[in-house]
Image (tube, rainbow, N blue to C red):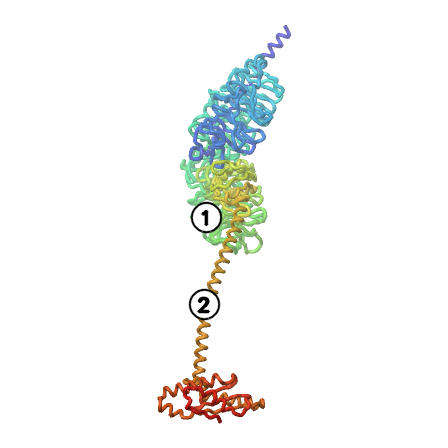
Amino acid sequence: MHARRASARTIAMLRLGRAFGAALALLCVVGPVAAQVASLRVYGTADGLRSLGADCLVEDPQANVYACTYGGLYRYEGERFERVGAGAGLDDAYVMNASPAPDGRGLWVATAANLYFWDGDRAVRVLDPAGSPLPFEVGHNVAALADGAVALSYSRALRATRDADGHWKTRALFDRAAEQAHPELAELGAVYRDGRALWFGCGQTVCRRTDDGQVRVYGPGDGVPRDAWTAFLRDRRGTLWARSPRHILVLAPGATRFEERPVPPPSMLATTTRHLDLTEDRQGRVLTRSDGGMLRWDGRWERFDTRNGLPDLPPNALLASRSGELWMSYPGLGVLRWRGYAGVENWGPGNGLQGLPNWSLARDAQGAMLFGNERDLHRLTAGDGRIQTLHNLLGEPVRDVFALTLGPDQAVWVALYRGQLLRLQGDELKAAATLPAKLRRIFFDDRQRLWICTTEGVYLIDDLAHPVARRFEALPAVSFGDVEQDAQGRLWFAGKAGVMRLERDDRVTRIHAQGDMPNTLFDKLSIGRDGTLWLSVDDAGLFRGPIGQGDTLTLKEVEDPLLRDAIPYFIRHDRAGRLWVGGSMGLDVLQDGKWTRLHEANGLISEDISEGGFFEDRDGSVWIGTSRGVSHLLHPEQLLARTPVALNIARVERGGQRIDSDAVLPWEQLPVRMTLSTPGSIAGTDMLKFRYRLRDRQDAWIETNSRTLDFPLLGSGKQVIEVQALDVGRRAQSEVVTFGFEVRPPWWRSPLLLALWGVLAVALVGSLWRWRVHAIVKHKQQLERLVAARTAELEADKRALELARTALQVQATHDGLTGLHNRTSIMEQLEREAVRAHAAGTQLAIALLDLDHFKQVNDTHGHLVGDVVLAGVADRLAHNMRGSDIIGRYGGEELLGVMPGLQPPAGGCRRCTTRWAPSRWSSMASRCA
């Protein structure tokens, strides 16, 4: 009896505990999370997706995000999705599920008709033990293991492993004995890898298979209601989560019984067995879908729905990436990325923040945030996330709130641009002072004095209890835009008259600024811990210089390509020493000497930052006012973390054919196309650039925004492409990635043909040489013939000339009738022979011949006969004289003979007479003397 009473008491206590736990769970459920508005980036057909329905979102170890769609498998590539696997064996359109290999070297892909293993280059179809394709039904999935995978097909589990040849083979994971012992194994609905164990949704229960093949079934007795269990998750705390259409269960580490995480109204769990993803964000919070949106467990359930800017339908798939982004897919919309999910909260018109832009931010003494803009003054109550619009004592809206600051009197001082200064204490908002100029900045110094920068000088309130604004006459009556206090308690003012410094004794020092700034119309300033003064002017650019005791300030422009073109709307340092510069193109932050630009891709509600829209909260978080709302940067250090830029070469192809690294390619007149991938990068095309070059062929880098690089016809030989990714916003760059391959020379430049070309070239050169030599020889011969002919002509001319000269000489020295020397010539011969004979002492004979009766011949027979007689005598004399003798016509019929060396013999004349006797003119006589 005692034991039964104890058992009943125990049962009652258990029931009471369960009821109490359920009540606590109900109390833990809250409404929309602080009513913040999600900054969503929607990816649709314009962003590469051909299908707007994605059944799965997965992330591989390299931080690549994949989407399973009705139009193929897609990978996120920096503000775009690109289809992968098409043309490499993965051509199926309806991709139902994917599971990355744990080592990051592949992806298991389940389609409606097949199971594939895609290694990044090509997809291999995996068949069942009978050699048939493995079809998948809705809800079935595949779980990648270290040495293969487990896939569900026809509600059965198949184990895929490689055989000795490296081919994928499948076999049944559970044998007949296991299925007979556990009939639930014949109806499997989901599989999840949990270390070396596997969890299944089996029938209406949950099953666990250990590495040694042992199976345990969890049913109602183990806290598992009968339902279709389709999703599992092991979180970083070691808790196992299980999801069905109507239940969410957890199994704590070391526990043997599941506990439920009930979701009370108005939230409802999904009634479908599909799309019940469980995912864990970077903060360790678990998210899943409900019928009205999403739920997140952070010690209690938090609800996200249309009031947070989400679509009015539940998501198909959820993925919290390691980088802190939340990815969602919605039917008919595409894939959505919640920008800044883990680190940025946004407030805008969608959650009650009306009136734009938001110029001023502050937190009051009660912990509420105040937002001031052109239209209203709003208060965000701490804890409940409600935004309340504040009015003045007359119930009128507060317009043109240009500045807010919490004073030492614990009141919030409100500056209206038109010149009014208000004081907010609790819920009471009343006027404090009215100034004759437009207000630009209000600032409390360390002596609790309120300084007011206006468009017509600087005003001062000394007594906050009795606020009277008086103009500070020591400063000129021009527009001043900013004021800060340095570590020595001095005030620095930036205005149209330049930079002014107010000493501790209220003396004003005009600072002589020098440097490379375009003008001295200063507007914004901030002072760093190291004593550096940061300034802006009425133009683009940011300038800095060290402050000192003197009145000279040397400024240098900040050499940054993004800041060079930006007009700063505020310059502020936070308590951590970071410098924040807001402008119309985003928010630039200097941390540890490195600049980072934050914009909408990082979660900001807008990139158009408002003037003065900066507030650092007590916890180190930062509020930023923009033209479309307010962004709360919860963890600036996470947003500014210097993560390396990853760059992969996704594929290289030519003519549609993939090229492997170090491949040797035949010569073709086709360009080479390289596709780049930047895993984990969320930078858009305006902030992510690539530069590339051909090693040893190009010295300068070529920059582009395109992830696809086309190289036109490349020469033969070794080709090495160098490429680098540049994250402009984070001022970071990846390592230089190289890809090398070789292009064979064209057939006409192959080694054999080159040798043949060489032989032909030598033969051609030889032929040309021979032809040239032959031409030269022929030309030489032609020249020789021409020269010979010309020489012959010249010789003939010479001979003719010589003959002419000889004839002339003969004509000049000989008598034309007799052919003998004429008088002049014979006298010269006589004189020459006389000189020679005298010199040599030899004999010289001289004969003067006179033809007797010659006149009678002329008279009788005529002169012609006389000429014949005279010529005949001359001829006889010429033929009978010695070779050295010379005969000449001395005159008329007288002849003169010169005979060198002749001895005068007796009877010489008689011989002459005798020799002439036979002449026909025998009657003629000759006389020798």
Q: Nearer the viewer, residue 82 or 562?
A: 82
Between disc 2 and disc 1, the foreground one is: 2
Q: Is residue 738 visible?
A: yes
Instruction: Count all numbered tags in the image, as a single digit.
Output: 2
Q: Which residue is nearer to you in this view: 97 or 63?
A: 97
Work out whether residue 652 or residue 867 is closer to the camera in this orientation and state it: 867
Viewer-closest of 243 and 714: 714
Q: Return the x and y of residue 194 as percentages of the image width and height.
A: 59, 24
Q: Residues within 10 Å of mark 2 (few under 14, many from 20)?
A: few
Residue sitting at the far top: 1
Disc 2, SS: helix
Image quadrant where residue 719 sits: top right
| Vertical side of 99 occupied by 536: above or below | below
**Which residue lies under the disc numbered 1?**
454
Report the residue marked by disc 2. Answer: 789
Residue 753: give x, y in percent of width and height: 52, 45
Residue 98: in sight, yes or no?
no
